[in-house]
Image (cartoon, rainbow, N blue to C red):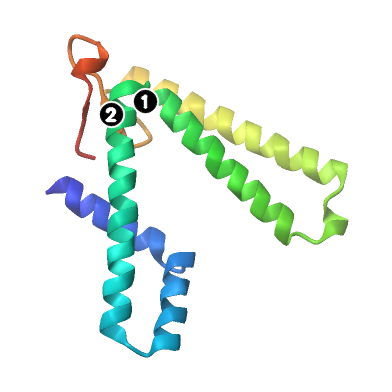
Amino acid sequence: MVAYITSLTFVVLAEMGDKTQLATVALATKYNSIIQVWLGTTTGMVIADAIGIVFGIVLCKNIPERLIKWFAALIFILFGLIGLYGSLPKHLLTLPVVAGGVTVIILLIWGINRLNDRQGSESEEPLIIRTCTAGTRGDKDSRKATDV
């Protein structure tokens, strides 16, 4: 039940004003049919989420959790940088501004990593939500997904 409530809360908060919600508003405006648009967008989201869940379970069993987190973080940073590049005025994209931005990103990554390492040595609970956990044997067959 904790996983359900946590997932529900995170998805509702994350999707507010997201491009999916804005696309849903556009579809509702175009077709003027609440039930059909709601069912279509909900079905699409369920399918997309199911694919994500299956990939998450497979990745959790076969790839170390730390590698998954770093890869996901780097992808998000890359998308953020691409978005900034596309939306910033070109006169702001100078070498000092870009170098400063990259420096800030590197310092933030370093700081978060240090906080996680320090917190991990002080307690069992990580600073960032744990997605997978290794069993007592430590092999990949003993990994399992856990409630958040």
Outermost residue, left direction?
1
Amino acid at circle 1: Glu
Residue 132, label in figure: 2
Q: Which residue is mark 1?
A: 65
Outermost residue, bottom direction?
32
Residue 62: image location, x then y, percent? 32, 22
User: Viewer-proximal residue, 45 or 4?
Assistant: 45
Residue 144, label in figure: none
Residue 25: image location, x then y, percent? 43, 79
Please tell me which of labels 1 and 2 falls first in the chain.
1
Secondary structure type for disc 1: helix
Pointers 1 and 2 in contact (C-beta within 8 Å): yes
Q: Quadrant of residue 52?
A: top left
Amino acid at circle 2: Cys
Residue 48: image location, x then y, percent? 34, 54
Q: Does residue 18 show up? A: no
Q: Residues within 10 Å of mark 2 (few under 14, many from 20)?
A: many
Position of 42 relative to 140 (above/below): below
74 relative to 144 in the view: left or right: right
Residue at 32% across, 88% down: 33
Secondary structure type for disc 2: strand
72 relative to 32 in the view: left or right: right
Residue at 49% across, 66% down: 19
> What separation in Å lies between label 1 and label 2 (alpha carbons)?
6 Å
Q: Residues within 10 Å of mark 1 (few under 14, many from 20)?
A: some
Q: Quadrant of residue 132?
A: top left
Residue 125: image location, x then y, percent? 28, 29
Residue at 69% across, 54% down: 84
